[in-house]
Image: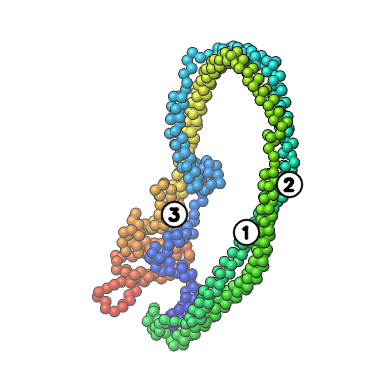
Amino acid sequence: MDGVPVQKKEYDAAIAELADEGVFKLLTSPTYFNEQLHWRERRKLLLDVCGDISDADVIASDKQLAKLPDLIGKRSLEDHRKVIAARRAEINRELERIPVRIDEAKRALPDIAGLVPSELDADIEKLKSQQRDLDQQLLRIEGGGEAAEVRKQLREAEADLLDMRNKHREQADRDIGQKRRELNAAVTSAQLLDRDRARMANKIERAESEIKQLEETNVRLREQWNEVAKRELVMDQADTCPTCGQAIPAWQLEEAREKALADFNRRRAQDLETITAKGKANNERIMELKIELVELNKKHDSLKSEIAELTKQADALKTEIDELAAGVTDIATDLEYMARSQIKVELEARLKQLATDQQAATSQIRREITSINQAISALQTSKLQIQQHTQGENRIAELMDQERKLATEYEQLEQELYLTELFVKTKVALLEERINSKFKLARFRLFETQINGGLSEVCETTFNGVPYSGGLNNAARIAVGLDIISTLSEHYGFSAPIFIDNAEAVVKLPNVDSQVIALYVSEEDKALRTEVVK
């Protein structure tokens, strides 16, 4: 530096005193901004230099956008566009379905020509009055005095037989019931203990599985420890400077080797210590689990013994219940029960005969009642058709009203969509206009229209409409790069020498306020030659 040999870190420190390394690269190379920076970094740098456009500024620039903040609320603009798109699609689907529904509703309207609701009600009431009269006649016939008395005696006989059966079973049921309660208690206890045993077995299985996993992990840790312990430092150290080609001093090479070896040994020791600590922790956990397994197995065996004893008790109780049930005698063999059963049979026969006598009288009345019911049903069906017709017309009116409302809502959504598109286009125009005004030659495209109509952020430099990355020649790239450096130098308040490679491609370099070091390829010059142009 100034003819004095220095180390790279000393050179970097000296440059850092003048400017940040990144800024220095931007101000010394015409291609660095466009070819080395990621497009997001280029975009951020342009916004830092020129300033972003706030949403409020965009809205203030066009009075049509004044309603936009109230429309989108707390949503982002892009989210609101998605909401609009989804709702428009939903409305379109509804508008396509509504005419079909209206047509279906019209076709479903029943024919009610000649039907008058008041006349139908009068006819129905007249028929119901006739039906009530016939019902009263039927009750009088079916409620004959002798039949009622026979039915009463039959109910009393059935009650006596039921009482005898209940008393006969009462004692046996008490004994069997007690044994069943004891059986249920034993079975319930065994089931509860078996659930405890299953949970215990699950704990044992998990503990054994964890021990197996920890032991397998320890095997891998031992293999890993041996691999780390055998690791040796391998250095591929160049003895010449890759930049200038000069030999690196021996003391620097030795210093680098010693530092690398020390770092290698330290990392290897740390790795071995980490592996050893993991293995020790695993062994301690294995010991805890084995102690726990001993206790779990004891409890598991104890539960199995208790379950076996309860199962044995349950089997014995089942045998006792079967024996008690087999010892119950049949009430049908009792003489008194047989006599009362015969009385019941005689009463049933008498009641059947009385019913046969009444059947002829009641059959005619029932046929008349059935005919009236059918007539009433037909009239009620006509009334239902009138009701269905009214409901259908109401449904058609509702669908038509819904169609009008959806069309109005769709128009509102179209207006909202237009405002969001206007906002995006306005912001793009304002932002690109602000940034491009800072440059003489370079122009920047900061947004790209997507297939769905939305915008995605980009940062493409153009010159006379030609993208930097798509067909711009070398001379134009250098000119654009110098234009960008001029604006950045003004922004940072700092100028640095500009290095231009392949300068022979440029007929005339644009004027800049910085020192320019142009590198030319010349067949006439066989050795490096410098020339100062003022």
- SS for dot 1: helix
Residue at (57% x, 13% y) in the render: 364
Tags 3 and 2 touching, CB below 8 Å: no
Up/down of 180 relative to 235, above or below: above
> At 71% from the left edge and 28% from the top edge, which residue is drawn?
340
Tell us which disc is closer to us: 1 or 2.
2
Q: Secondary structure at mark 2?
A: helix
Alpha-carbon span between mark 1 and mark 2: 30 Å
**N-terminal of the two: label 3 or label 2?**
2
- Residue at x 46% of width, y 42% of height: 85
* Residue that mark 1 sits on: 198
**Which quarter of the image is occupied by the N terminus?**
bottom left
Instruction: Indicate the amino acid at tag 1.
Output: Ala
Q: Position of residue 29 (x, y in %)?
A: 39, 68
Q: Which residue is mark 2?
A: 178
Could you say which quadrant of the image residue 210 lies in?
bottom right
Inter-mark Cα distance, 3 to 2? 84 Å
**On residue 13, which mark appears?**
none
Q: CA distance from mark 3 to mark 1?
A: 61 Å
Q: Quadrant of the C terminus?
A: bottom left
Is residue 47 among what the camera can see? yes
Residue 282 occupies quadrant? bottom right
Q: Residue at x 31, y 59 (%)?
A: 471
Work out whether 425 lies above or below 508: above
- Decide: few, some or many residues near mark 3? Use Cα within 10 Å; few <14, some 14-19, many ≥20: few
Q: Which mark is residue 457?
A: 3
Q: Is residue 62 visible?
A: no
Q: Is residue 6 above or below residue 363?
A: below
Q: Percent from the top left, x then y, of residue 87?
A: 48, 40
